[in-house]
Structures are given as C-alpha cells and as structure tokens.
Image (cartoon, rainbow, N blue to C red):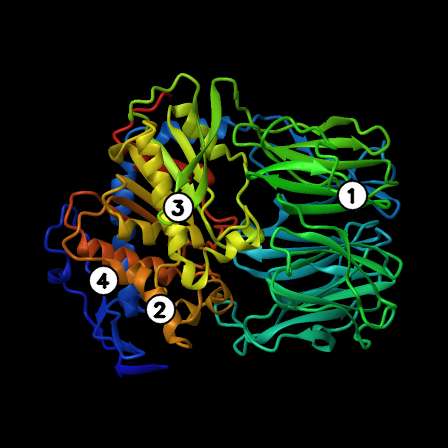
Amino acid sequence: MRLLVAAALLVAAVPALAQARASMPYPAPPRADVVDTYWGTPVPDPYRPLENADAPATQAWLRAESALTRQYLDALPYRTEIATAFRAMYPAATSETPPERHGPFWTSSRRAAGKRSVIIVRDALLQPGRVLLDENDLPRSDSVAYTAWSQSGRLFAYGTVTNGSDWVTWHVRDVLTAMDRPDVVRWSKYASASFNGDDGFYYPGYDAPASGSERDDPAGFYKAFYHKLGTPQSADVVIAAAANEREYPAAFVADDPRYVLVTFGEPDLNGFDVFPADRPGAPRTHLVDRGDGPVRFIANRGTRFFFFTKAGTPNGRVIAVNAEDPKHVANTIVPERADVLDDVSMIGDRFYLDYLHDVHSVIADERGRAVGTIALPGAGTATAPVTSDDRTFAYYTYQSFLEPQTTYRYDVATGRSTVAAPASVAFDASPYVTEQMFATSADGTRVPVFVSHRRDMRYDGSTPTILWGYGAGGDVFTVTPYFGSTNALWLRFGGAYAVVNARGGGEYGESWHRAGMLAHKQHTFDDVIAAAQLLIDRGITSHAKLALSGASWGGLMVGAVVTERPDLFAAATSSAGVYDMVRFPKTNAGAVTAIEMGRGDQSEAAFRALYAYSPLHNVRPGTSYPAMLIATGDHDDRVSPGESYKFAAALQHAQAGDAPILLRVTANAGHDYGAAGSAADAVADRYAFLMKNLNFTPSL
C-alpha cells in the first residue's frame, strides 16, 4: 500500500544545491520536497520534478546538462578518429539478403553503405528486381520496424515508427503497383502483423489514447485486432483482450492458412487457442494451457500443432496437440535434455533443434540425438534453418564475437551448407581470440564469461576492458555469442571486450531466468561483480582499466552494481536504463516489465527486495563514483527518460571524487534511438569518454 505523505512541491533550482565537492560545474536541477511511504518506509524523491520533461525548469536543466556534456565530450582526444574508423568498417559495396518466396514473387532486402534498406521484388528468382519500398524515401524521423506479406504475395504491410517510438503505424502496399492502399492502422505496439489471405490482417496494440498523442499512455489494456481491408480502423474486430496490464494477447495465421492462432496470458506464462481463418473472431478451440514457462508455436500439419515449451521443463521440449482432440492432450515429441533448447524449426516433417551447450549453438535433428546435424564454423550462435520455397533449400545464420553474421544456404537433401549472404562488415578477426571463462558468484554458482582480446595480449592487468551484461528477460533475451561492430572496433583499438551471462537471462533455461528475477534479482548483480573480479584476478585488466556497460535492463544492472561496488570500476556507460525501482511500474511500459522485477506498491516483500538494490535509492552522498556516461532518448516510451534524469542528478549531487558524471540525451529518439542521431557520433562519444577515463591510448 502506498500513501503520499508530502505533496510534490516544485522549488526553483539554486546553485547551492550542487554537490559539495564539484570537480565539474554541474547544473542544479529542480527539486521537490516529496516523500512517499511504502509499507511504513518513507522514500524521499527529491528529483521528482525531472519526471515532467516538458516543465520549463526541467527543460532549462536539460539544456544546461547538454551543454556541459557536449563541452566535455567534444574536447576529448580521438573522438573524430573513432567516428572515422567506425564508418570505415562498412564497405561501399551493396549487400542483399537471401531471397524469400511469397506467392509467385521472390523478395529480398538490399542495403548500400550509409543508406537504409530497400525491399526488392522479382517475378521469378533469376529475373531483375524492382523496388517495392525504399526506406530512404521515408521522412528521416521514420523507420520501418516490421513487415508482413499476404499468403498470395500480392500485398505487403510495413509498420513504421517515428523517432524510435514503440508505437507502430501500419501501411499496406500493392506488390504489383508498389502503391499504398488507403488503409492506415495506428496504435499498434511491440509485434508484427499477420495477413488473413488478401482480406485483412491481424495486429496487436491498444485503443487510441484519449488525446490522440503518442506521448500519452495507451488507452485500456493490450488487445489483438483484426483489420478488414477497405474498412475504417474504428470497425476493427477485437480478437482477444488482456485482462490486466501484464498480458499481451496476439493473433496470427498458422503455416496452414486455414487456421488462426491466438496466444494469451503473460509473456512467460502464455497459452494458445485456435479458430478457423475464414471466420475472424469465431469461437476458439483451446490447445495449450498457461503454464509455468513460455510457450512458442513452431508449425502445424493440418490439425496437428507443434509447440516449443518450457512449461514444466525448464530446458525446453517439443510437444504436439491435435485441435480435434477435445482433451487437448500435449504429446511430447522431443523430450527435455541437459542442454537448453533455444530455437526450433520444422522443414517438411523434420525438426531442427538449436541447443545451447555452455551458451553456444549446437544443431540437432528431430530426435535431439544427432548432435552436429549442421556443422557450424565454431562456438557461436546459429539460428535453426527455415525455408519459404519448395523446402529443398533452407537458410540459417551464424555469428560469433569475432565473426559477423553470415547467412548460409542449407541443402535439405544433402546436408551441405554454402554461404548465401556474406558479412558486410570489414573486420579481420585473425589477430584476436575469444576465451570462455567461468566466474564463481557469491553463492557458489558457476557463471559464464566470454572475453575477446588480441592473441598477443599480456596478462598483466594493463588491457582496457569493457564488461557488458544484461541478465533479464529469460529466453527472450538470452545472450549468446554475437558480433557487434562497435565491440570489434574496441578490439581493433587494443582493448578487450567481455560479456557475462548473468542469471536472469535464458542461457541455462528457465531456472537460470528465475534465479535472477523478482526476489532473486541480487543474483544478477552478484554474477556481474564476480565476472569483474575474475577479469582482474586473471590479469586481463585492473580496477583502473575496467569499465561496465549495459542498456535497458542492462542499464539497471550497471546502476545497481556501480552503486553497490563503486570501487570496482574506473568508468561505466549506461543507456535507456531503469534506475528507480520504486516508481518504474508507474511510467511508460514499466507495469508490464514489472513481471520481471515485481511491484513494490502491491507487495511489501517486493518493495523490500526492490528498495534494497534500487540504483536511485542507493546513491550515497560523499562517495567516489566511477566516471559515468548516462544516455537516453528524450522520446523513449518504453523506459521513461526521467529515470536517467533523476539518476544522473542524484549521482552528480553525491559525487565526492573527480570522475565526471555526464548525461547524454538524444533528441527525438526512443528506447533504441531509432532513426535519430548518428551511430558514429554515439560510438565516438562513448569510446572517447572511456578512453579518457581508462587512460587508454588506442591503436588507430
């Protein structure tokens, strides 16, 4: 239960409120004499005014913060060279994705260096392509977030977002004419659309906000809608509606277009129903109950539907349910095994199973026994092969920390793989190596840590190292070996890059996820701290050369670890982070993500756990904090930018050392920054900041 014991009182910003020992002239933020009480505990929130981004006092503070940040960053050495090196990693040649078949058409996506994607259509596989959609023709603020094709291939839907927002606007384009139809559907969010023949499409979202503004909270709870082409959006049919703010129903057409599936419930506790596609909104036949783990649809063969589930089997299994069985009995097709099942596809009557063995992919056949069905280049991350043509050939991708994502063409009959789309990043991996190590966490748990570095690196603690982590979201955010061009750039400069697979992710199944969520969240931070200590103990780096990095829930990780162990790092960078664990469910998409962390306003036990590690509430005045660059987008409608504003203000006020605490706000940008800003500029700012504060002279 929450009681407001002191009303918010806006106070003019005065210089005297700046921290006592200011090595930088931090602007004084607006403050308020606010104290909330949760379960008998008073919780001061002096920076509450910063949640109101449009208030004049907040805007004035943000302008002053921006000026200070730019003055510091623009004066740093190597900033221009970093941006130039980043741009040079992308060759001028045009790259194109492997072809996909939609009805009689073959489609692909083409991208030239420095440009956005162009969707190409061919009337036959070997014929010249024509442009269906050129993303470069859209307004600079807009980008294409989702696409969908009708079964006939004659209609193409594309969902655009503005300034990186999570709100999606759907447009429908005629493939033969490359012209948009009149249908425009707004207020969709978080997921793609699914065509029902050429008659219409299913999409998820909300009723329009009362004011019609994307800056406002959505109206009501999440819903799955059906839009019949040629009719107004106001006539759209509600297929399924959430019962509360934690549920995310969705509807989509199955492989066999005679059926539509509806998934309902919470993201990690969902079930499935089915109904005939020729009757949108018809009564549904129940297939799979909600369980104690996530369930994902794989494919169907007639009335037999196959699912990948972790309900009751934390490492995952494959089940089959017959829609004509009134008892909807789930028959196990592929049982659970010691390794975690991460991805499943079905080609013909054969399953391809992507298992994780100590966090790297191993592909198996439908029985889960023939390990190595597809020989992978190394210990990296592969996707299960999928096909859209005559099922003779399928495509899968592979990448590692040192190998950019490459698409392979897989011959289903012979089992041979050939490169279909080579990587488009200019990076020579030969001077580098990736080691997998294992840290021992506070409770004795074995925690994987991948470290990439030069082969000739000296183990004397002198290598500037970035430690990145996430540790949340279960199998939705499983962190396996991936290639990041910015990470590769850090290696080229002479640094080391480490990734910790902290509890909360899905790297070792649902049990690993649940060990890092709700009341067990401290395990995530303990795992990261153990990984940092391992890097130091192995001589890879030292306290003075170590930086921590994360984004979103990884930003929470950065905030919690830095406030708990400020002595462990010389610098940290965080973007779009969650820092106020008391109020986060009250803003943007926080109520949904509270599934992962709990709500302190609804449970005393949850409040005690959250308050114990909440980064904002664990900032201690008079503490020497490492250098921090806190980044956010001013239009982030997933994690409120006010979280970053308040955390930065608190750290600046508390800082007793000389290390800078900077706030970098990207204008007109959302959670992932979207089309706003320059990737090269963002990388240059972050790496120049780290080089300065790790005393790192790069090899340029």
- Quarter of the image where one finds residue 459: top left
Label 1 to label 2: alpha-carbon separation: 46 Å
Q: Earlier in the sequence, mark 2 or mark 3?
A: 3
Which amino acid type is shown beneath numbered disc 3?
Gly
Which residue is denoted by mark 4 in the rendering?
29
- Quarter of the image where one finds residue 80: top left
Q: Earlier in the sequence, mark 2 or mark 4?
A: 4
- Tell me if residue 652 comes above or below residue 112 in the rendering: below
416 displayed left or right of 18: right
**Quarter of the image with the C terminus in it:** top left
Q: Residues within 10 Å of mark 2 (few under 14, many from 20)?
A: many
Residues at marks 2 and 3 touching, judged by CB atoms closer than 8 Å? no
Of discs 2 and 4, which sits in the foreground? 2
Q: Earlier in the sequence, mark 3 or mark 1?
A: 1
Q: Residues within 10 Å of mark 3 (few under 14, many from 20)?
A: few
Which residue is denoted by mark 1 in the rendering?
366
- Camera sees residue 669: yes
| Residue at image point 32% right, 66% down | 611
Which amino acid type is shown beneath numbered disc 1?
Glu
Of discs 3 and 4, which sits in the foreground? 3
- Tell me if residue 598 comes above or below residue 442 in the rendering: below
Which residue is denoted by mark 2 in the rendering?
582
Which residue is denoted by mark 3 in the rendering?
444
Where disc 3 sits, the SS reads loop
Q: Earlier in the sequence, mark 4 or mark 1?
A: 4
Which amino acid type is shown beneath numbered disc 2?
Val
Q: Earlier in the sequence, mark 3 or mark 4?
A: 4
410 displayed left or right of 690: right
| Residue at image point 36% right, 71% down | 607
